[in-house]
Amino acid sequence: MKLPVFVVDAFTAKAFHGNPAAVCLLENKLDEDMHQKIAREMNLSETAFIRKLHPTDNFTQSSCFGLRWFTPASEVPLCGHATLASAAVLFDKIKNVNSTLTFVTLSGELKARRAEDGIILDLPLYPAHPQDFHEVEDLIKTAIGDTRVQDMRYSPDTRKLLVRLSDTYKRSFLENLKVNTQDLPQVESTGKVKGLILTLKGEPGGQTPAFDFYSRYFAPWVGVAEDPVTGSAHAVLSSYWSQQLGKKDMHGRAVFVVFSFFLKTW
């Protein structure tokens, strides 16, 4: 069996930057267990599988495809950077003729469209609700010790826990913070939490660009100790920070990626 597989660095214009994802184009139906085996072999945070929805579809002319994402450990319901990578493969490598692509996924229909300087990806917006500290105290203490926490929210749609660090901290603190991810699946084994977002309010611009917020993302429950940047986390972050800052247009930065994004929420 031969499958075309591409490795794409998403959220960057430079090689060996951004967040890499593998993209597989499926001409024919793939045995179910092969998805996970290939993802495990690729050993990236996500491997995307693009499939035709109808026998007459083709990757150059069609505008709608099925899309699934797998970490090395399991299938996930949403992945932003692997979706962006999938669109880049179809647009730039396969030379798909359409200006907009629609992906049918576990999170509904996602659209990616050509832009003058890249690709614009539409992601769903997931609200996060206040979370009782005592219910997740062990998880937080295990992950970040005595680091001061200003706010906590939980997104039931994505099973992500958002932890906002104290505004007294600077970006460098979040960058250098040692996070214990190894023990998290044992501490939180109920299935309620599948991802941990650490976020920090942005700093005013000076000699460096201004960002509305910073973030890091951890998902050891699905085999990803830390993801350099993930769209699904930003689908939660955008909802939270839009409410906190009273803004619709925001710039955020995942601290370990040379990357910034323009996000518009409605």
Image (tube, grey):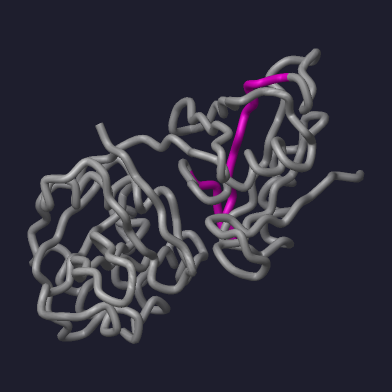
x 46%, y 41%: residue? 77
Q: Is residue 24 left or right of residue 207?
A: right
Query: What is the quadrant of residue 158 in the picture?
Result: top left
Give how far across and how far down residue 52 sits, in percent. 72, 24
Q: Main secondary structure of the magenta part?
A: strand
Q: Position of residue 251 (x, y in %)?
A: 31, 55
Residue 71 falls within the magenta-colored stretch:
yes
Give residue 123's position: percent from left, percent from top: 41, 37
Does residue 156 sit above or below 187 in this rendering?
above
Q: In front here: 235 or 202?
A: 202
Above or below 69: residue 98: above
Residue at left offset 48%, top offset 32%:
106
Residue 215 vertical position relative to residue 30 in the rendered view, above or below? below
Q: Is residue 212 visible?
A: yes
Q: Magenta span covers which residues? A: 62-76
Please state if 81 lies on the left or on the right of 199 as rendered.
Answer: right
Q: How many marks?
A: 0
Looking at this view, name the residue that lies furthest to the front. 207
Task: Choose between 126 and 241: the one closer to the eye.
Answer: 241
